[in-house]
Amino acid sequence: MRVALLSPRSPVSNAAGIEQNIHHVSHYLSKKGVNVEVFCTTFHAQRTLTRDGISIHEFPAFAPKDNYFLSTPLYHALRKWEGGIVHCNGYNNLVSVVGIMAKKKNQKLVFTLNSSGSSSRLRELLHIPLAWFYHFNRKKIDHLVCVSKWEHERLAPTFGLNKKDVSIIPNGISLSEFKKKGKRKKGKILSVGRLVKNKGMHHLIAAFAHVQKEMPEAQLHIVGEGPQREELEQQAHALGLKSNVFFHGNIGFEERETLLEHYRTASLFSLLTEYESQGIVFAEAAAAGLPMAIPNKGVMREYVEAGLAEGIQDGFNSEEVSRVLVRLLRKKRSAKKPSLKPLIWDWKEVGAAVHHLYQKLEKES
């Protein structure tokens, strides 16, 4: 079995949701004897790397402000590729479009939606031609994978595929990483996500200004990188929070222990994102035993209903958000933890489900 996993960014240097999926699933498949190759884009010159026996082909792309990821070299490479299964990842990136266009008649194509919000007006407008393109090319898609029940209900019907050709396989986390416990720092709020407008970091900083007045010892730690960083740093400075808001930048796979330490030492997790198809960071925060303050909408509502998070009705209202944050920071933590199942999967379970899907498609060939 030979598989091409498509990713907007390289899993070598990025650890966002899709790249985490690619990293863990590719390693699982490789251990099962599958010949896995990753096709992705890069800001550098074209190159092929080998990591743990997995070939990672990086191609230059048009990707302003880390968006879109349109690569004609990647398209031409896929057209020459002779493997049997092409697996696209991400509804909103043009690498998936390239993968569908490059598919040959003798190949099977799997499409994992892993949809995301729109960080700009242009990206929001891009949804219209993307929806048209995917629907028009639906016959090229052999199996559609949604990463949450919410995504399955909202996006899957627009493809017009048979029910048997659609399934739910969520992104996972490495549950074993969260067995180790750390000493919680009083008042430490953790937020993890790309620094783009739709992740709501500016709303969280505005709310934290109110929190800080009631709890001067409180700190906000933001992990992530993106085009909004300078604006967010200026906002924190203008609100007099420079010594209480910390920007840690992107933390990749090689620095994974640093991120885990943040989860172990935080007292609360919050991300006021406008849109998530699943949100790996929510699963990680829950596995770390952190109380969460997140919007009570979309896929986030699944975490609220499972008792893993406190739902915020209006994430744009800084006073409402701050009241929830202060209450959770002061609330005595219960010794009884809600179950992570069936909402949260381990990456091994995800890898096994993907492998089973490939075997099924291979038998149908």
Image (cartoon, rainbow, N blue to C red):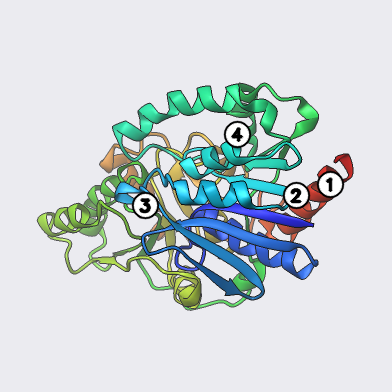
Asked whether, in this view, residue 285 is left or right of residue 42, the answer is: right
Q: Is residue 339 visible?
A: no
> Compared with residue 64, is residue 217 higher up or lower down, i.e. above or below?
below
Dot 4 corresponds to which residue?
150
Q: Earlier in the sequence, mark 3 or mark 1?
A: 3
Q: Measure the C-alpha gap from mark 1 to mark 2.
A: 8 Å
Label pair 3/1, CB-CB below 8 angstroms: no
* Residue kind at label 2, given as amino acid type: Gly
* Residue kind at label 1, given as amino acid type: Glu
Q: Which mark is residue 362?
A: 1
Between disc 1 and disc 2, the foreground one is: 2
Q: Measure the C-alpha gap from mark 4 to mark 2.
A: 30 Å
Q: Quadrant of residue 124?
A: top left
Dot 2 corresponds to which residue?
84
Between disc 4 and disc 1, the foreground one is: 1
Crowdedness of circle 2 by 10 Å Cα count: few (<14), some, many (20+)?
Answer: some
Label pair 1/2, CB-CB below 8 angstroms: yes
Q: Earlier in the sequence, mark 1 or mark 2?
A: 2
Residue drawn at x 13%, y 54% is 239
Q: Measure the C-alpha gap from mark 4 to mark 1.
A: 28 Å
Crowdedness of circle 1 by 10 Å Cα count: few (<14), some, many (20+)?
Answer: some
Mark 1 lies on a secondary structure that is helix
Camera-side residue: 339 or 125?
A: 125
